[in-house]
Amino acid sequence: MKTINICKHFSIIIIWIILLIGFMPHTTYTSLAVDEKAVPVTTIIQDALQQNANGDFIWTLPDKLSDIFTPMLTIHPNYLLELDENNITMDDDVMMTTYNYPIVVVEKESEIPVAFLDIQFRHFLNGDLSYHLSLSQASEDAPLLDTGADLINPPLLEDLGLTWTIFESFDSTEDTSHIRIDDLYQITYADTIDNTTSKWTPLIKTDFQQPAAARSDAIVLPKTAVFSSQMRFGMVDVYTLLDANVIIENLGLSPTNLLTKSTGGRKWIARLPLPKSITHKALTEHWGIMSLNQISPFSNDQDSIIADDIRIADLNRFRKLRTDGIYYEVPTSYVPYAPRAYWRVPAEHIGQRFISSIQNQKKRGQQVTNTHLETLSIMSLNHNLPQQNEAGFWITEPKSKWLYDDYGIEAGFYDTRFSTDAALFILDMYRFYNRTDKEDVPSLSLEESNQLMASLTAYADFLLWYGDRFSFVTKNGGLLLQDYHHPTIAHEPTHVSLNHLVTEMNFLLSYSLLLDNQNNARQKYPYLELASKIRTAVHDTSISWIKDNQDLWYAYMPDGRYGLMDYPRLTRNDLIISIDLLEAIYGEKDMVFKALIQSKESYLTKNNLPLW
């Protein structure tokens, strides 16, 4: 094996410095400069990325991760892997460092680029490392997007012999005569891809496909994500790309992953075929996480709640994770739509669930040794922040046929619930990580703290602007903020759903409390004023929300009527949060909100529906 020659040109040396810093722990440049014990940069450059005689790339991971994991990229001898040195990037993101390796796949004989491979690493403050691979045709061969659903055909696949391998080393005392599988778990489904009925199951011999299962040194893994003690190794996805950030899963084209025995451990192998289409762009993607901590929720008797959190989040088949966010199945009322299509949701509900779970475990006095929830929360935060637009809110990119037919709203609209949930997640992350008194928890730097506060302020200010312009006014001056708005195309006024409305109030109240804690009490009054007007609107319309059967109406309609079917528990849960926040600020429980909760709970109880 030889080290890549980096001494030919000064520019190449600079590039490798960038590469290396990306793989170093999340540390400021200043501290690197003054740390006399820091490893000399030239030494680390020589070890950061190596290339063997076959032209394969081998990475050395940061900290002690390199003692356990070694990633390697290989390809068939008919092709070359070339690093696109001019487009290497490294970014100091919030509580993580992100660095990208753009790689060009070149056919040897013709010397023509045939594919592009983007490899992104994210090194988190807790020590975890995620990776994401995305393979596509070279740009000159890639087709234009076409949103016509009738013309969508699965791409064809070309085998370049491109494989991503991770060598995992075991303790020297472990028996490595056979492939270790006793720590492997997967999420399985019944008849449909449903996170309410899915379950965790250990991988056993019968799960492995033939003929490799008959060998002692290699097995074919099920077509799913596999969790080991310290690793998540995802399935390989082949996507068809539509517009509005909609992707189609082509499960039948996804190759299976392999697990093989290696000296002192095992090898995880993902095969990456090149997708080709004449009508749509297509991608092959694969991602995973490596950790010094615990990834599997079944390691060291971890809390069963963690297992439920990861299973319900399901970033395998129920949802998809990409470098820019988490994707949910597209509703049939959205455009573009296709079976097994996913769209990027502006709210980071998974990160929100995970950070809430971490907080609850801390409140119970539990030591959280599984870092999977935290790593995905930090990742979600760094998806969320860049998607916030200059006006302060988050856009829903696909078109909703329902909203277009009823109100004339085009694609690229503001959904008050999704945006408010996005802001509430940022607020939760700020409150949990903007502290220096917790030794076992990473913390925000001053710059990161200011970045999150700027995001929260931008959305709070936008709500002030929005509430003043797009609300129905009640008899006592209350404001019913409309659920949807297009920022550039005029449309009819929309309905106001109770869950959207009180969640907006909850954000404003929470943001006001945050300003109190920062001794910025004077700044909170405009936000408290809008929250108070929303509360007044709920009071003015109180009993009108209650149906004859004690259920709640979903929405106040533009013509003044009430209509649509409410969620089973979502609105009730939002109202409970409202009561707690109102009591924290005003010192008393709100009896109107309490009456709405009691009515909803009576309906649920009478109909034998669960309260939680």
Image (spheres, grey):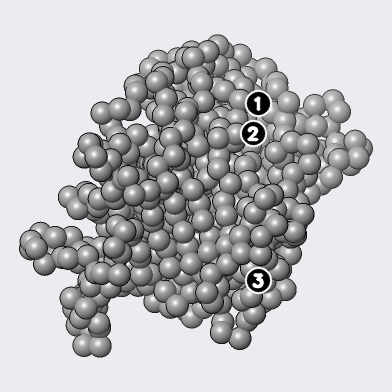
Q: Tell me the SS state at disc 2.
A: helix
Name the amino acid, label 1: Ala
Q: Disc 3 or 2, which lies upstream in sequence?
A: 3
Percent position (x, y) of residue 346? 48, 39
Q: Is residue 345 above or below residue 451?
A: above
User: Which of marks 1 and 2 precedes in the sequence?
Assistant: 2
Q: Which type of secondary structure does the marked residue at label 3 adopt?
A: loop
- Residue drawn at (62%, 81%) of the image: 174
The image quadrant of residue 259 is: bottom right
Question: In this view of the protein, can residue 429 be seen by the observer?
Answer: no
Q: Name the disc covering residue 178, or none.
A: 3
Q: Is residue 88 left or right of residue 361?
A: left
Give whichever of 447, 306 is nearer the camera.
306
In this rendering, the answer to whether 31 lies above or below 503 is below
Distance (Cα) linking label 2 and label 1? 6 Å
Circles 3 and 2 in contact, beta carbons < 8 Å: no
Q: CA distance from mark 3 to mark 2?
A: 58 Å
Vertical arrangement, residue 581 with respect to residue 572, above or below: below
Image quarter of the N terminus? bottom left
Q: Position of residue 46 (x, y in %)?
A: 23, 72
Numbered circle sitting on residue 498: 2
Label 2 crowding class (10 Å Cα cut-off): few <14, some 14-19, many 20+? many
Pointer 2 and pointer 1: residues touching (CB < 8 Å)? yes
Depth check: give the residue in front, 551 or 332: 332
The residue under the point 53% across, 30% down is 248
Residue 409 in the image, given as x and y percentages of width and height:
47, 17
Write the residue at 17% across / 65% down.
5
Q: Please rate how many residues cluster around mark 1, counting C-alpha atoms within 10 Å: few if below 14, some from 14 to 19, many from 20.
A: many
Residue 555's label in the rendered image is 1
Tag 3 or tag 1, which sits nearer the N-term?
3
